Image: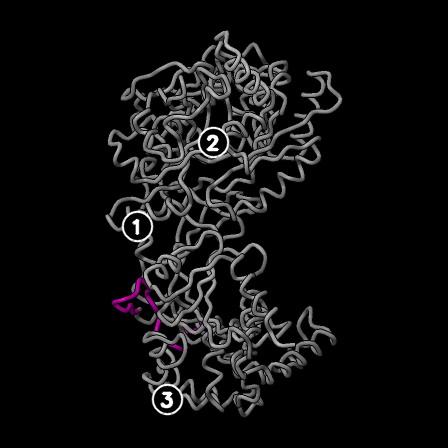
Amino acid sequence: MIYDSHTLQHLTHETNRLLPLAQSTPICADENDMAQLREILHFHEHRYYVLSAPLIADYEYDQLFKWLVATELQFPEKRTPDSPTLRIGSSLNSQFQTVAHLVPMLSLDNSYQPEDLIDFNRKVLELSGATQVTYCVEPKFDGASISLLYENDRLTRATTRGDGVEGEEITQNIRQIRSIPLQASFSDFGIKQIEIRGEVIMSKQSFDAFNRELSAQGSNVLANPRNAAAGSLRMKDTREVARRKLDAFLYHISYVLLDDTNNIQVQAAVAKGKQQLATHSGSLELLWELGLRSPEKEKRVFENINQVIIYCAEAEAGRDNLPYEIDGMVIKVNSIDLQDQLGMTSHHPRWAIAYKFKARQATTQLLGVEFQVGRTGAVTPVAKLAPVSLGGVTISSISIHNEEYIREKQLMIGDRVLIERAGDVIPQIVQSLPELRNGSETAIQFPTHCPVCKSELFKEETEAVWRCINIECEAQVIEKIIHFVSKDAMDIKSFGEANVRKFYEMGLLKDIPGIYTLPLDLVAGLEGFGRKSIDNLQSAIEASKQQPLHRLIYGLGIRFVGETTAKTLANPITHLLDYRNISEEHLMALEDVGKKVAASIHAFFSNPQNIEMLEQLEKLGVQLVNQKKEVPASGALTGKSFLFTGTLNQFTRKQAEEMAEAQGGVIVGSVSAKLNYLVVGADAGSKLEKAKKINTIHVISEEEFIQLIQTTQNNAPA
């Protein structure tokens, strides 16, 4: 099936036209729209299942599909023989031999709200006549579906899902996946032949490593692990498949042929197999016992649907801690006899449903680019998007970082783009969709001069960022003040970003020292500033003058100086202006201060304007003397340096750092030979890879860190 560029543009336009209707109207009343809806669903199935190159997000496809289902239920006479609702899957790829599945591979009905699960449970009870049903719940892996056939204990065939009735034969590629055994002792359970369904996945770590490799080669990176896994299965070179380090979960036994040999031992094995296969949870246990990676450890069994709903919410909250991607949970009636009784529709089994998590990807249009100037002068392009809802948040702006990022993603104004929002992480553009361009798109022109003060921009050879180096640039001044008053810096409550911008625009505030000469009598005349608000603001400003020196250092916004480095800088001096006389070489002798950081600190204290600002602050009462000089905590970990990376489960990173410091540990900001312990949480990235290359660093898990802390506490003198 080949779509020319004109047809592709037309179907994309129709997708964008019908999607808002599918989201807002219960049925598709127009017959022409119904015909168009069927066509675009076929088109997107082909892109998803055959080409492994979807042009819309899963959630958007589901909305269109559900719209057609609802319409055909309302008007069954309008259903056509080729409706996507009447068949299981999509087209097959002609480059592989096709073979029939022993049992059709059905899709799952999808749900997005707890109410959908309650309705599913109601239907199960009504159809079965039961008063209570036990459910087995397991992750919905975001990968590529496969079907495995074992005969006489040996893997004889592996296929893709295909159209659900037939699939592409990919046995040689599946043999490259180490978690799929080439043989297993099914005969111990009296099984002669068995067909098993599962999902091929690529772990987050393998996906990131593979994309880094593609980027280094100058190739386009892949959008997500699912696409990477699906594309791998259809490769002709099995060595390339092996290189991608795929994995697989096997979660459903679709067909079993038991040995009918009239032998006491064989019949005993058959009886044991029947016992295991009586429930879905039992079948997962059987697969696990035989060495197949089933979700035996991930599954949960519940006695009612309310328990299921609670668990699904917990699973969604914890999805980012998993080493692989999941996009929901699958709820299955646990009893196999009851599954058989409930049966299936032409599209999905009545005994199972997928509870989909909030969408993480969506498509939209890149309408334009604005260039913003930060407190260090960095010019950041921000993509302005056609508003789209994603994960419960409407997104209309996304940072696109720098000029190199724009080139890497091949972004143009007018492009359709795929965006992603993982958990609470800031949204990002995953990729542009250049095949949807119609010729009206325009290149993104990066400015040569500051968009605020019009000064010429500068870029260091070792950086990707263009900067405005005019320190009087209005945008930088505002951002520096906002940073100075922020919670982790001088913590001047009631003096947030909105107030900084308001005071600056009104001419009441022009620089950091101006915070301490703010005309509160004029502020009192502004809307929203009553007597209590003014008193609170004045108290917060006065209190900030006595903040520890490391907070002031951090608040100054010196490039590369974070909270940890600010503490390092505060400790060895008596007065902040001592740094006027300290060389870069002496700075580099400090813990966690390298050449780049030392050069930035030295440049800051060599600038007469910065020195004048600090002198003004001191005259206004801000504490520049190190009155709270820290004495290293004594403990079993005194002098040992720690760095935390990845997502911790039991503590925030700040809490963990405080635990280490309480035992005398030192927190550093980067991996180097000076580091003693790297504590690794979920989704650890480049820091872990770098630490592995330095033999003196102890790489430990969060659990090992807790044990280390507990051991030092237990051994502390009474």
Circle 2: element type: helix
* Three-letter amino acid code at the position of disc 1: Glu
Image disc number at residue 582: 3
Q: Residue at x 49, y 32 (%)?
A: 294
**Number of residues whose C-alpha sits closer than 10 Å to that of mark 1, classed few (under 14), some (14–19) or many (20 or more):** some
Q: Are the two marked residues, 2 and 1, in contact with CB atoms closer than 8 angstroms?
A: no
Q: Position of residue 355 (x, y in %)?
A: 58, 33
Q: Which residue is drawn at 60% across and 26% down?
A: 332
Q: Are the two marked residues, 3 and 2, in contact with CB atoms closer than 8 angstroms?
A: no
* Three-letter amino acid code at the position of disc 2: Arg
Task: Please state if 667 lies on the left or on the right of 495 as rendered.
Answer: left
Q: Position of residue 529 (x, y in %)?
A: 69, 72
Answer yes or no: is residue 104 visible. yes
Q: Which residue is drawn at 42% across and 42% down?
A: 203
Vertical order, 530 against 139 (above or below) = below
Image disc number at residue 17: 2
The one of 265 and 275 positioned closer to us in this rendering:
265
- Disc 3 or disc 1, which is closer to the eye? 3
Say whether residue 460 is magenta.
Answer: yes
Q: Position of residue 505 (x, y in %)?
A: 53, 72
Image disc number at residue 408: 1
Q: Where is residue 566 in the image (x, y as percent from the top left)?
A: 47, 77
The magenta-colored residue range is 458-474
